[in-house]
Amino acid sequence: MPRRPITFELASELLLDAAVDPTRWTEAMETIAQYANSTGAVLLQVKGRGPGTPHTRSLDEGMDVYFRDGWHLRDERNRGLPYVKKKGIFVDQDFASREEVERSDYYRGFLAKYDINWSAGVGFSNADDEWCLVFERGDKQGFFESREEADLVRFSAQLDRVALLGRNLAYANATGMLDAYESIGSASFLLDRFGRVIRLNAQAQRLIGDGLMLSHGRLSCVHPKDSVALAGLIAALTTPVFATAALPLVAARRPAKRPLAIQGIPLTGLASAVFSPAKSILLVADTEKRSATPLEHLRTMFGLTTTEAILVSRLEQDINLSNAAEQTGIAFETARSYLKRIFAKTGTSRQSELLMLLRRLPRGE
């Protein structure tokens, strides 16, 4: 079967596909890089950029070094951003002569090592951030010419749509998780990549003024020492390498009441997709109240997924499997399949045995 030719329409179509299915981002980036006759391509945020954004496989090593060695903090191509505002795209020759490029440690010491020392950056935005789709070339391909700029800048309008679609889908998925936690009586706060609260459920709202304080999106505790610990947890959640260390449990003390227990959960999957404003969730357990086993305990102790943990929590409240499936938003047959996996993970074989196991677990009281 002949290979489908790479056209602007095909590349644009794949970008939209990636907004709906984040697993297709690498395919989309590879395709648009080929369309532009580039060594590679990468999506970069204009402000507060960090690792993990889509790029071609050819840039894997270069992107690791870019962030590890702090090149992102002294990226000379930032000089091209004013040109993006004027014409929607920048190329290196807009702001640097060949002599400057030849003398530059950034261009010749870093970029040339990975054969990416000529660039074109197409600007676009979503509701939260400004971005650039950066095409990279080496000396063999040379700089981007005016006719190529006129062609590549067409991606800007399509990327605006891609970013809006991706953001809305991811945000809906993340807020759906808050609703799920709400339905089982768990307070939760949705945080952006800067650690600011962008949404909270009703259970969490009840804790504002009762152990927690919220001001201009920043969450804090009544006691200063607890606030420091909470800030440390949030900082760990917003640091790209947080997964390499265990996240601490924070106790927020309250006058004449038992403390609140705060846990941090990094978002994964669609909820944390590239254009999502949401990056993590804080779960808060009120140890003054007896409740179902916290979801994160189920996830940590038995390796349950979030959906499996929510299903278990509903069963623990004596909700039958049919109703538990409906309230969790899954089909009954899917719930039965989940329950079989839950039995395997918890070492039980019947629902009654599973519930007996849950009753033996501590509730933090």
Image (spheres, rainbow, N blue to C red):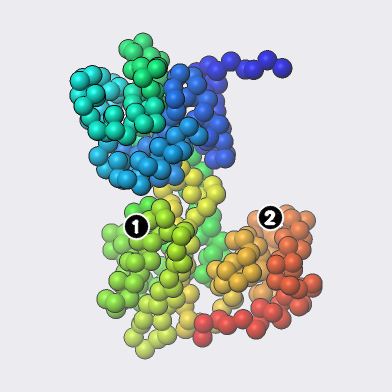
Query: Which is closer to the viewer, label 1 or label 2?
Result: 1
The residue that appears at 77% across and 61% down in the rendered structure is: 336
Q: Amino acid at mark 1?
A: Arg
User: Dot 1: what SS?
Assistant: loop
User: In whole angstroms, how far apart are the C-alphas of marks 1 and 2?
Assistant: 31 Å
Residue depicted at 41% across the width and 48% down the height: 277
Q: Position of residue 200 (x, y in %)?
A: 43, 61
Q: Is residue 313 visible?
A: yes
Q: Quadrant of residue 233?
A: bottom left
Q: Position of residue 302 (x, y in %)?
A: 64, 69
Q: Splitting the image into 4 quarters, where does residue 333 fall? A: bottom right
Image quarter in which the N terminus is found: top right
Tell me if 338 is positioned left or right of 77 in this view: right
**Residue located 34% across and 72% down the image:** 229
Q: Position of residue 352 (x, y in %)?
A: 77, 77
Residue type indicated by callout 2:
Ile
Q: Between residues 263 and 57, which one lies in front from this camera angle? A: 57
Q: State whether residue 205 is above or below residue 68.
A: below
- Of the image marks 1 and 2, the number of the one nearer the N terminus: 1
Instruction: Residue lying at the far top in this picture: please name it.
Output: 147
In the image, what residue occupies the spot 70% across and 75% down?
A: 318
Q: Position of residue 198 (x, y in %)?
A: 38, 55
Which of 49 and 281 lies nearest the eye of the viewer? 49
Q: Secondary structure at mark 2?
A: loop
| Most distant residue in the bottom direction | 256
The residue tagged 1 is: 196
**Would you name the residue on which mark 2 appears?**
330
What crowding class fits label 2: few (fewer than 14 Cα within 10 Å), some (14-19), or many (20 or more)? some
| In contact (CB < 8 Å): disc 1 and disc 2 | no
